[in-house]
Image (spheres, grey):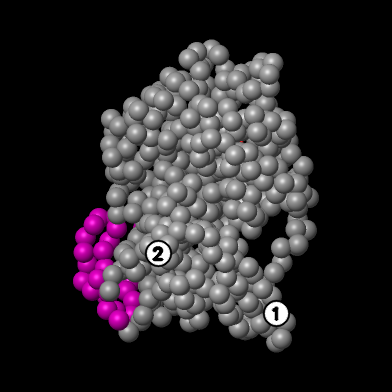
């Protein structure tokens, strides 16, 4: 059965997901590194009531104008505070748990490679090694790309070992997984693999349901760093997903090595509401990404990712990232699963790939490339996009804030992102099919003061433009994204 069809049924069944309909929208489990600027956004979905915050630890304050908790906590520890929303005497409270630690699983989003889009069932020791080598040879590693992750089908086709332990395919991993992980680590990179919170994975290999502890211990033994945990073949209810991912998260906590739990249930059950509580550090927000600007239902082109991400920025932060799935930059229509549902025309223009990269950076989405190292379709222009350190710095900003939607029309979408040092990144994406002008209006961007003058850098070219005040107008090619960094 086609994946898109299965997902369609899930969406239908979950159409009535209302248990989470609260007017107070904020994360309840948040993280920060000690002495690094922290920010938590609070959003109200029904209008004009008043938000107050009580019990903030020293170093944090409530910014009522912007509706954010902000500041720096110096000391490591677990803190709690209460966010209350009073609307005509009706009070909603959220107890927030803030963990300040220098040992967080995913302080900034991962930047790496995932095998699925192009390699699928061919994943092997040799492919993992080739990717690690390539990242060093082509300069991606130096630019910050530092994780190699195996997706589905690394598992032995014959199933688990007799003692229940997971086994890699012996033909494709003749030396076992520990040696593969060691190789990746020797290159200064992290190593990841994939499983599923059910008996079987999406592609039919064995999953981890009922084997959470055995698997977590074995992954730790293999020196795994990141585990993507899928949700095919599992019951559709949100409650069950919370329990199943929680079991995985608990097993990871007891394992002898820290491992990052990457939740992949496609955003269907709003994992941004419970993923961190289950022990996850990031979660997919959509169906599988496609190598297209827009795509048929069941998949996610760039447009579908914008449509979802624009509504959930308040749930993303340090060690709790909304993940827009693999990047298609560099694929040029050569992938496999990423080619499905693309109205028959997989592949994007360079401007569209630029938009994908720029938005994933603005959103602090985890980023995974997905090219096939055997054919290596990355061009010099792709590498220039992916090595743009000014944009990477947005993705890796230690405050971990996802850009907020500022305005949208059929023509232009504008986002703004708060950065740790107080700078603000702004982007505009041209959705229309011709070059057009777009105006940033600082009065509409809460992070900016329309009366102040800002230094302005074009993050694609690095060029420092004349200082700007109140706003400015730029010309944007069809389907591309301009990004600027504004500093006081
Ligand atoms: C999907 C998942 C993909 C990939 C695939 C493997 O459910 O969303 O990213 O992991 O399974 O079978």
Q: Which residue is mark 1?
A: 91
Residue 316: % across, % down? 52, 59
Residue 246 against residue 339 in the figure, above or below: below
Front in this rendered view, residue 44 or 340? 44
The prevailing secondary structure element of the residues shown in magenta is: strand
Give the vertical position of 228 relative to 295 (above or below): above
Residue 372 visible within the image? yes
> In the shown orientation, is residue 70 left or right of residue 337?
left
Q: Is residue 470 magenta?
A: yes
Which residue appears at 30% of the width and 32% of the height? 136
Distance, label 2 to label 1, CA atoms, is 32 Å
Label 2 neighbourhood size at 10 Å, few (<14), some (14-19), many (20+)? some
Membership of 101 in magenta stretch: no
Residue occupying image coordinates x 54% and y 49%: 282
Closer to the N terminus: mark 2 or mark 1? 2
- Residue lying at 38% horizontally and 52% vertically, measured from the top left: 396
Q: SS of the residue at dot 2?
A: loop
The N terminus appears in which quarter of the rendering?
Answer: top right
Q: Position of residue 57 (x, y in %)?
A: 49, 71
Residue 118 visible within the image: no
Residue extending farthest bottom: 88
Q: Mark 2 or mark 1: which is in front?
A: 2
Question: Residue at horizontal 44%, vertical 44%?
Answer: 110
The residue under label 2 is 74
Q: Is mark 2 within 8 Å of ligand 1?
A: no
237 and 116: which is toward the camera = 237
| Badge 1 element | strand
Q: How busy is the neighbourhood of tag 1: few (under 14 within 10 Å), some, or many (20 plus)?
A: few
Q: Is residue 150 left or right of residue 92?
A: left
Magenta segment? 452-481
């Amino acid at each position: 059965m086609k994946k898109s069809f299965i997902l369609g049924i899930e969406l239908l069944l979950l159409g009535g997901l209302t248990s989470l309909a609260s007017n107070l929208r904020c994360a309840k489990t948040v993280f920060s590194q000690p002495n690094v600027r922290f920010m938590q956004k609070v959003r109200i979905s029904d209008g004009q009531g008043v938000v107050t915050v009580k019990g903030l630890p020293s170093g944090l304050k409530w910014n009522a104008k912007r509706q954010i908790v902000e500041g720096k906590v110096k000391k490591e520890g677990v803190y709690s505070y209460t966010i209350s929303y009073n609307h005509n005497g009706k009070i909603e409270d959220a107890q927030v748990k803030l963990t300040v630690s220098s040992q967080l699983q995913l302080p900034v989003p991962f930047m790496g490679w995932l095998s699925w889009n192009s390699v699928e069932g061919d994943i092997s020791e040799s492919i993992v090694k080739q990717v690690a080598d390539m990242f060093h040879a082509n300069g991606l590693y130096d630019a910050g790309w530092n994780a190699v992750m195996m997706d589905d089908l690394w598992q032995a086709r014959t199933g688990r070992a007799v003692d229940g332990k997971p086994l890699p395919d012996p033909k494709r991993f003749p030396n076992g997984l520990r040696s593969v992980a060691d190789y990746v680590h020797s290159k200064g990179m992290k190593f990841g693999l994939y499983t599923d919170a059910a008996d079987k994975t999406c592609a039919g290999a064995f999953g981890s349901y009922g084997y959470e502890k055995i698997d977590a211990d074995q992954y730790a033994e293999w020196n795994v760093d990141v585990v993507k945990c899928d949700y095919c073949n599992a019951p559709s209810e949100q409650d069950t997903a919370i329990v199943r991912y929680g079991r995985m998260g608990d097993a990871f906590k007891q394992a002898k090595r820290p491992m990052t739990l990457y939740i992949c249930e496609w955003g269907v059950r709003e994992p941004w509401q419970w993923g961190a509580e289950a022990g996850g550090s990031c979660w997919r927000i959509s169906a599988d990404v496609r190598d297209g600007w827009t795509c048929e239902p069941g998949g996610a082109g760039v447009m579908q990712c914008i449509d979802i991400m624009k509504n959930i920025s308040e749930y993303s932060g340090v060690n709790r990232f909304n993940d827009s799935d693999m990047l298609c930059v560099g694929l040029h229509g050569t992938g496999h699963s990423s080619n499905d549902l693309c109205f028959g025309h997989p592949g994007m223009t360079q401007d569209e790939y630029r938009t994908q990269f720029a938005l994933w950076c603005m959103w602090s989405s985890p980023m995974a490339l997905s090219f096939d190292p055997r054919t290596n379709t990355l061009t010099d222009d792709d590498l220039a996009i992916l090595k743009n350190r000014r944009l990477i710095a947005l993705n890796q900003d230690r405050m971990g804030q996802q850009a907020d939607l500022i305005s949208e029309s059929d023509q232009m979408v504008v986002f703004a992102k708060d950065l740790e040092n107080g700078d603000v990144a702004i982007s505009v994406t041209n959705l229309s099919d011709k070059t057009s002008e777009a105006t940033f209006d600082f009065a509409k961007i809460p992070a900016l003061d329309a009366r102040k003058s800002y230094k302005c850098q074009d993050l694609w070219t690095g060029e420092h433009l004349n200082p700007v005040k109140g706003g400015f107008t730029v010309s944007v090619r069809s389907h591309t994204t301009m990004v600027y960094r504004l500093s006081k």
